[in-house]
Amino acid sequence: MAGKYDYDLFVIGAGSGGVRASRIAAGHGARVAVAEEYRVGGTCVIRGCVPKKLLVYASHFAEDFEEAAGFGWTVGETRFSWEKLIANKDREIDRLNGIYIRNLKNAGVEIVESRAVLKDAHTVHLVKEDRDVTADKILVATGAWPFMPAIPGIEHAITSNEAFHLAELPKRIVVVGGGYIAVEFAGIFNGLGAQTTQLYRGPLFLRGFDDDLREILAQEMVKKGVDLRMNIDIAKIERTTVGALALTLTDGSVHETDAVMYATGRAPNTAGLGLETAGVALGPKGEILVDKFSKTNIDNIYAVGDVTDRANLTPVAIREGQAFAETVFNGNPIAVDHSVIPTAVFSQPEMGTVGLTEAEARAKLGEIDIYKTSFRPMKGTLSGSEEKTFMKLVVEPQSQRVLGVHILGPTSGEIIQAIGIAVTMGATKAQFDATVAVHPTASEELVTLKEKWQPPAAQAAD
């Protein structure tokens, strides 16, 4: 392609969505540049899902060592080194960062290591280089950033960004928040041996997930040693004379800890990008408003990923980036379907979920069929673990289509990926039933559930 602009596409942000869009557009012959002021790879690779999952793996070993005895293993003295874990994690992140850079260069994408700010609909100012470039199309893919409340002493707190780079593992830590990041980090710190407290201002964490999963996970986390406190928040943080932190809670009590990590949501990363100058419309949270093809109100400016606050997940950002490139640079219009998205929460125990929750299905349809089961996994019979696995199907009564599947237990994330295919295809309960079980596995329960669940009142009436 050629024209009056320096580039056919200029991408602001080299995270999952921006990188995918850049590579695909370049593959279709576009002249592409991507600006990134920190490191190529974005939140997921550098300070999100990838390093988080590595820490989750690390936090499971203490339980694994304990459970090994039931299978005849004698495990000797064990020691954990936070410093070694973080160094190994950093080495892996460096490797992935290198792969992302190499893939972009191999695709012919120019990488600009600078903050980029819009001057108008076609002009981008590169702050570090103090120069302007022009582009026919501009894609904003700057993601989201942790939200911190404005309370006294908030400067003493950290977010997940800093948690990956702590010099040492705190002996005591308080995690504030009720989303998946808070839940995952509470499990990580607890599993690694820190005395862990999780505070949430609402009645039950993980709002938006199925209620059964939320309730059972809360019970299991408490059994594992997390001090889980609902309907409470921090009013003030103070540094004590011995270097600890004194937290004044909203009930007036004071809690002492060594570190406080806030995971109270993430806000679209749109401040200071010049979006208002270029005339791009924003929503109430600062999110960039887009149509189904990720186009903003300005005809040549698009946005994908968390910055649009649609479905804030890495695979969704990747899908949106690819759809944008196909639509704009390959004449193949693709609108991403956000209605059925399989996802996992790497809590302890793990959660996997796809489709409608029971509450959503009842609100939408009224009558629904529920199938669910709770059991002790086979491994627990010898390990001595009392941890429960839970599985649930939400089914539309007339068509018998499976509208939602919700799982709590080991490898739930792996299971839900495969189940997500069936739910996306519109599989029915009869098709689940007709599938031969893989035995002995936990997931076989999903195709052997025969009895519809009834609430206690209905059972009593029967």
Image (cartoon, rainbow, N blue to C red):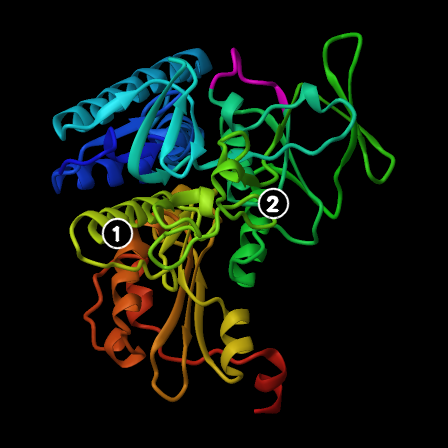
The part of the chain drawn in magenta is 165-172
Classify 10 Å Cα crowding around label 2: few (below 14), some (14-19), many (20 and above). Answer: many
Q: Closer to the N terminus: mark 1 or mark 2? A: 2
Q: Secondary structure at mark 2?
A: loop
Q: Residue at x 24, y 36 (%)?
A: 22
Q: Quadrant of residue 77?
A: top left
Provide residue 341's location: percent of width, then percent of height. Answer: 36, 58
Q: Which mark is residue 178?
A: 2
Extreme right residue here? Answer: 252
In this orientation, which residue lies closer to the viewer: 425 or 367? 425
Side of 190 where 249 appears, left or right: right
Whether residue 342 is situated above or below residue 201 in the rendered picture: below
Residue type (three-letter) at the residue carrying disc 1: Ala
Residue type (three-letter) at the residue carrying disc 2: Gly
Q: Residue at x 41, y 31 (%)?
A: 43
Work out which quarter of the rendered image holds the C terminus and state it. Answer: bottom right
Side of 196 where 104 appears, left or right: left
Whether residue 335 is situated above or below residue 125 in the rendered picture: below
Provide residue 371's location: percent of width, then percent of height. Answer: 43, 74
* Residue hosting label 1: 323
User: Is residue 220 in sight in this rendering?
Assistant: yes
In three-dimensional space, the C-alpha distance between marks 1 and 2, rounded to whole angstroms, equals 32 Å
Whether residue 225 is situated above or below residue 51 in the rendered picture: below
Provide residue 337's location: percent of width, then percent of height. Answer: 33, 62
Q: Secondary structure at mark 1?
A: helix
Provide residue 420's location: percent of width, then percent of height. Answer: 30, 61
Extreme top residue here? Answer: 242
User: Is residue 72 in sight in this rendering?
Assistant: no
